Image: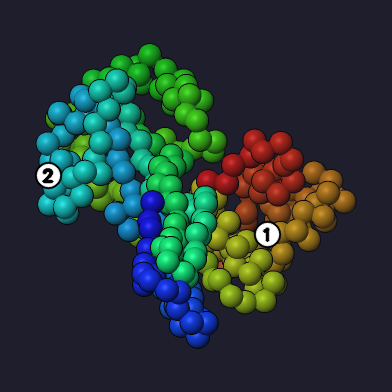
Amino acid sequence: MIFVVFKASEGRKRKRPAKKVLTAFINLSLGYKRKAIEREISASLNSRCEQYMYCHVSRSVFDEFLATRMVFADRDIQDQLVCEENSSDMVLWYRKCIEVLEEFKVSDCGNESIICCYILFFLQALQHVFAAVLSLNSLKELIRSGRLEDFVATRKLSYSVPSSTLVLIIFGNNSRQVGLACPFFCSVAIYYVVLQGIRDSTPDVLVHDWWDKMLAAICRMQDGQRRAVLSVYPNPFRAYKRFKEIGYTRAVQELADLQAESGRRLGPAMAHRLFMILTDSTGMEIVG
């Protein structure tokens, strides 16, 4: 809660011009204070700065990972790593939000004080990303028993934020796999950076660029085949309408006969998959 208090002079009341000057000064001061509050609210909503994020972990995670506590301490945000005694092995992130729910003024330019009050509420909003901490042995057991998918589904269903993303944090002695995984994830990151599309252009160019990136993500489709599809079907929406009109057999035959620069045909298997991706209405066909 923020108070801005101005004390009027005691004794007889000031003349009218002095009252106007005092009122103008108060309004100016309130304007500065209001702008400062608005900037802080905007920063809490839009900024990715770590000062607005709080990480809640269980006691077991807090005690196990000393290096994490040291990182928070080195960045002077150790108060934002919160240990919850009754929590499971989960890692939850909260964003600090600031709201002004009430604002009122009591003003009298006579012998009374002029009080202006802003009531600020600091809230913590649970984020859509959360994590589960598993030991390497626990992960192996879930994989052997075939319960990994059920484990992930159960954790996501129990999370209160819809459309959430679960991250599995695995710890244990497995240096060889870690050494292999790091280059893999680096290559994936580089791959997705390369595939970033254009942002500002005409609708046709944007659709063509999106269609190009979509074809590039289809497994086992070579670059020459992708260019062949783009040259004949530059717009996926028009291709979808055409395939619906001519039916499955003719559409798959057309796609299968497409040839790359090397002379290699697209083939019936890839033609079938491309047809199903474009015409599927159930959401079961996945690009990748």
Instruction: Using residue 142 as the reference point, say whether residue 171 is left or right of it.
Output: left
- Residue under the image location 36 percent in, 21 percent down: 143
Asked if residue 209 is positioned above or below residue 191 in the image, the reply reads below
Residue 272 relative to residue 34: left or right:
right
User: Residue 126 in the image: x percent, y percent?
Assistant: 43, 39
Tell me the amino acid under the disc marked 1: Leu
Which residue is disc 1 drawn over? 258
Q: Residue furthest top?
A: 145
Q: Measuring from the top left, give residue 157's x and y in whole percent.
A: 51, 25
Pick whichever, 43 or 275, lies toward us.
Answer: 43
Please tell me which of labels 1 and 2 falls first in the chain. Answer: 2
Give how far across and how far down residue 240 sits, in percent. Answer: 77, 54
Residue 153: tell me if it is visible.
no
Whether the residues at callouts 1 and 2 have beta carbons within 8 Å, the answer is: no
State the scheme by which the image is colored. Answer: rainbow
Q: Quadrant of residue 210?
A: bottom right
Write the residue at 59% across / 67% down: 209
| Residue lying furthest bottom | 17
Where 126 sits versus 88, above or below?
Answer: below
Sort mark 1 into few (<14), some (14-19) or many (20+) by Cα contacts within 10 Å.
some
Q: Secondary structure at mark 2?
A: helix
Q: Amino acid at mark 2?
A: Met
Task: Name the disc covering residue 70, or none.
Answer: 2
**Residue at image point 50% right, 30% down:** 160
Observer able to see residue 15: yes
Looking at this view, is 224 or 209 the one in front?
Answer: 209
Q: Is residue 198 left or right of residue 228?
A: left
Left or right, 123 with reference to 101: left
